[in-house]
Amino acid sequence: MDGIIDLAELLLAVSLLALGFFAGKLAEWRHYRSIREREGVTLKVPAVSFRNLNDPRPVRDARLAIGSVVVSADYYKRFLMAFRKVFGGEVHSYSSVIDRGRREAVLRMKESCPDADLFLNFRLATSSISNSRGRDIGCVEVIAYATAIQFER
Amino acid sequence: MILTSVETVPGKTIVEHYGLVQGSTIRAKHIGRDIMAGLKNIVGGELKGYTELLVEARDQATGRMVAQAKELGANAVVNIRYSTASVAQGAAEILSYGTAVRVE
């Protein structure tokens, strides 16, 4: 009887891993494709980290622009992380998760002000959101904010 | 109310300073969202429920900051900063602060 339960647990773990691996890969590929497309559209509008606007053109409008996203790693990536914790070193599987979150947040910030010519004093903040059961579920919030400047045309 | 993340409002001049204003909110996520997020965690990617929750919380914190600035007679808040901290398991504090000013 115990053997059957053990086997069922093993099968569940393997199927979760497989689901995490394939569905996670597919979701990541689709997300990156959407990010690249949208980045192409907003490429001409720079987000800069200076505080001062050294531009002779008169400003018509200045307002705060915010974009945020909560992203998490899939089951397979968390499995890799468990191994990585034994040997230490860079966690490559997680860098794509944070990268996606950060680029998505920047895109949402830019898309919230489509008329802007420049994003001034651009800032990024990342914070981890903990789970109620105290388990680390590897999800982070990324927020991007800046002052959207629109020049007089 | 004009909100910016730089020390001034570009295109306008500051005529009066009213000092620091802040707004904060502590939000807990409800269990339904937690279960959905737990399922979504297998596949990874964006957790839309949590994103919405934090956007709502940030709007509320900003609203409280703006209300404080209005009380002081300001018409703009400059140099706004945001910070998120988890204060307890499953609850996050969103803080927003800036300097209330009057611009012309």
Image (cartoon, coloured by chain):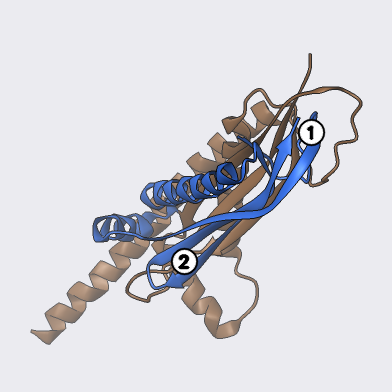
x, y percentage for residue A14?
31, 67
Apparent side of residue A146 relative to residue B60 in the rendered image (left or right): right
Q: Residue at x 40, y 53 (%)?
A: B50
Chain that is blue in the image: B
Q: Do pointers 1 and 2 mark residues of a single chain?
A: no
x, y percentage for residue B8?
78, 41
In the rendered image of the structure, the colour used to display chain A is brown
Tell me if I can see residue A96 in this picture.
no
Mark 1 and mark 2: Cα distance apart in space: 39 Å
x, y percentage for residue B69?
59, 45
Disc 2 crowd, CA 10 A, few/some/many (<14, 14-19, 20+): many
Residue identified by numbered label 2 = A138
Chain letter for mark 2: A
State which quadrant residue B82 falls in.
bottom right
As displayed, is residue A64 above or below residue A128?
above
User: Is disc 2 placed on a helix, strand or loop?
Assistant: loop
Tell me if I can see residue B45 in this picture.
yes
Residue identified by numbered label 1 = B10
